[in-house]
Amino acid sequence: MIGSVGDSATHHAIKDAVVLFYSATAGPRDTTVAYTDSAGGFAVRLSRRGPYVYTARSVSFSQSRGSIDVARAAETLRVVMHSVGWLCDVRLTAR
């Protein structure tokens, strides 16, 4: 399977996102992990065909979940994530 992860507001690629896949029939014990490249793309070989649940995670974005039915090896998935803004504001000062 190939795919990409993008920002819902800017449509820019999200690099270094983590996308986890597990078979809806086998459950999370059979999890496959993919990481996006600088263009937001990923490629992963899933162990079997059938329904999968996926979760995408990245810093400053809300988690995205969904499902896909993998019928062939060349499936394509487009994941869209929503920005949550800054998680915190830290100010450092020297003494």
Image: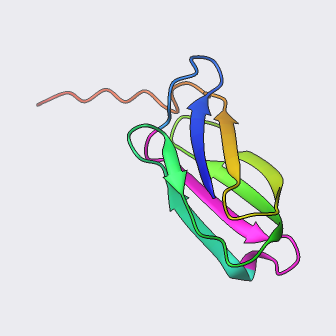
In this figure, what is the number of numbered marks?
0
Looking at this rendering, what residue extends furthest in the left direction?
95
Looking at this rendering, what residue extends furthest in the top direction?
10
Q: Is residue 27 magenta?
A: yes
Q: Is residue 63 left or right of residue 70?
A: left
Q: Is residue 37 left or right of residue 81?
A: left
Place of residue 76 in the rendered image (x, y in percent of width and height, measured from the top left): 68, 48
Q: Is residue 79 magenta?
A: no
Which image quadrant: the C terminus? top left
Q: Residue at x 61, y 27 (%)?
A: 83
Place of residue 33 in the rendered image (x, y in percent of width and height, measured from the top left): 57, 66
When asked about the image quadrant of residue 21, the answer is bottom right
Q: Residue at x 83, y 54 (%)?
A: 67
Q: Is residue 92 above or below residue 64?
A: above
Q: Is residue 83 above or below residue 65?
A: above
When asked about the image quadrant of residue 15, the answer is top left
Q: Residue at x 60, y 47 (%)?
A: 3
Nearer to the camera, 92 or 65: 65
Q: Residue at x 44, y 47 (%)?
A: 16
Place of residue 57 in the rendered image (x, y in percent of width and height, measured from the top left): 60, 48
Q: Is residue 90 left or right of residue 49?
A: left
Place of residue 54 in the rendered image (x, y in percent of width and height, measured from the top left): 73, 57
Q: Please say whether residue 63 is visible from this viewpoint.
A: no
Q: Please say whether residue 69 is visible from this viewpoint.
A: yes
Residues shaded magenta: 15-28
When asked about the image quadrant of residue 31, the answer is bottom right
